[in-house]
Amino acid sequence: MASLSGPPARPPFWNLSAWRAMYPGMWAWVIQRLSAVVLLVIFPFHVLNPYNKWLRIAVLALVILHGMHGLKVIFTDFGFPARHQRKLLWVLTALGAAAFFWLAYLRKAFWGFF
């Protein structure tokens, strides 16, 4: 009779080998979830003190990061080819970085505050 053993045991959450084995799509998922949690924590501070420069930069960076990873999820859900997922992740990361620096420059140069 065949043994009814389950799938191989996964390493515990705190074991670094489990994190090193994750593929880029999973990292994108983790980063999006973490950015959402951090936004939920710092956004009330931003509402209470909207003129704090570092808080503004953090909110802008996290919103763009969260949005770019959200776009990756949308593209994936609508059938973007799996063989191009890594390229999509890097293109959206580059677009997010460009958007961050462009918006940060606009806020400082044209809107007079940052």
Image: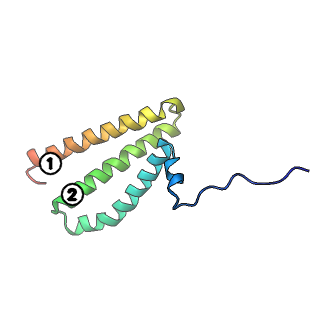
Q: Position of residue 63 (x, y in %)?
A: 32, 52
User: Is residue 110 visible to the viewer in this orientation of the structure?
Assistant: no
Q: Residue at x 36, y 61 (%)?
A: 38
Picture disc at residue 107: 1
- Residue reaching furthest right? 1
Q: Measuring from the top left, give residue 77's x and y in whole percent.
A: 52, 40
The quadrant where residue 4 appears: bottom right
Label 1 crowd (10 A; few <14 / some 14-19 / many >=20) = few
Q: Residues within 10 Å of mark 2 (few under 14, many from 20)?
A: some
Q: Secondary structure under badge 1?
A: helix
C-alpha span from label 2 to label 1? 10 Å
Label whose residue precedes the other's in the sequence (2 or 1): 2
Residue at 92 percent across and 50 percent down: it is 1
Left or right of residue 77, residue 108 in this image: left
SS state under label 2: helix
Relative horizontal placement of residue 104, taking residue 29 as reference (left or right): left
> Which amino acid type is marked by label 2?
Arg
- Quadrant placement of the C terminus: bottom left
Residue 4 disc label: none
> Which residue is at the front of the view, 88 or 78?
88
Q: Residue at x 28, y 41 (%)?
A: 97
- The answer to whether the residue labelled 2 contacts the one labelled 1, judged by CB atoms less than 8 Å apart, is yes
Q: Image quarter for residue 91?
A: top left
Question: Is residue 55 visible from the viewing direction of this image?
Answer: yes
Residue beneath disc 2: 56
Image coordinates of residue 53 in percent, x first then y, are 16, 59
Query: Which residue sits at x=48%, y=30%?
Result: 84
Between 58 and 50, which is closer to the camera in this rendering?
58
